[in-house]
Image (cartoon, helix red, strand yellow):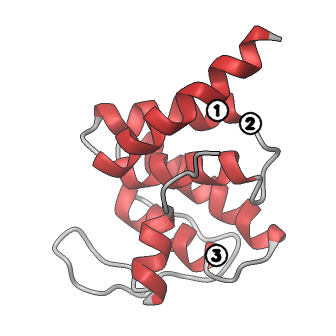
Amino acid sequence: MKKLLVSIGTLFLLAGCVPTTQKGHTQRASSNTSASCSSGVECQNIGLRHAGRGEQKHYAIASRYFKKSCDYGLSEGCNNLAFLYANARGVKQSYTLAYKYWGMACRMGNESACANLELAKDKVAAMHKH
């Protein structure tokens, strides 16, 4: 069985959990569940903070921020949202939605998303045959 590649900020920058700004500087994101965000990077950083807690309720919050990040056009937000859908982290598992968001991120130039998209093709195709 093929495995999906690591996502969620390459598993929080390989356990570093350091959110960054667009210029690569560290940024402290709010842990408040009602926090708003005004950019893709800001939404992504808040999502990473919640996903880093590793609990379903925090993954659910992270999914909302990754969706906002994706809506702002940040490929990492789309890629991470797809990962949550593929792995049922805070959302109902949906390979169709994972495929959709990986496709969006891939079209934005995210290489990890493109690789995940290729791996997910078989899963989505098999689901639609039944």
* Horizontal relation, residue 2 to residue 26: left or right: right
| Residue underneath mark 3 | 50
Q: Is residue 51 visible?
A: yes
**Residue position marked by numbered label 1 in the rendering:** 97
User: Marks 1 and 3: in contact by CB < 8 Å?
Assistant: no
Q: Is residue 30 above or below residue 107?
A: below
Q: Earlier in the sequence, mark 3 or mark 1?
A: 3
For discs 2 and 3, the disc positioned in front in the rendered view: 2
Q: Are marks 2 and 1 in contact (CB under 8 Å)?
A: yes
Name the side, left or right, on which 2 lies relative to 90: left
Q: Amino acid at mark 2?
A: Ser
Mark 2 — residue? 94
x and y, in percent, of residue 52 in the image:
61, 80
Between disc 3 and disc 1, the foreground one is: 1
Q: Specify the amino acid type for callout 1.
A: Leu
**99 lies above or below 87:** above
Decide which of tag 2 and tag 3 comes sooner along the chain.
Answer: 3
| Circle on res. 109 | none
Residue displayed at 55% across by 51% down? 4
Given residues 10 and 115, the one toward you in this image is 115
Q: Residue furthest front?
A: 1
Mark-to-mark CA distance, 2 and 1? 5 Å
Residue type (three-letter) at the residue carrying disc 3: His
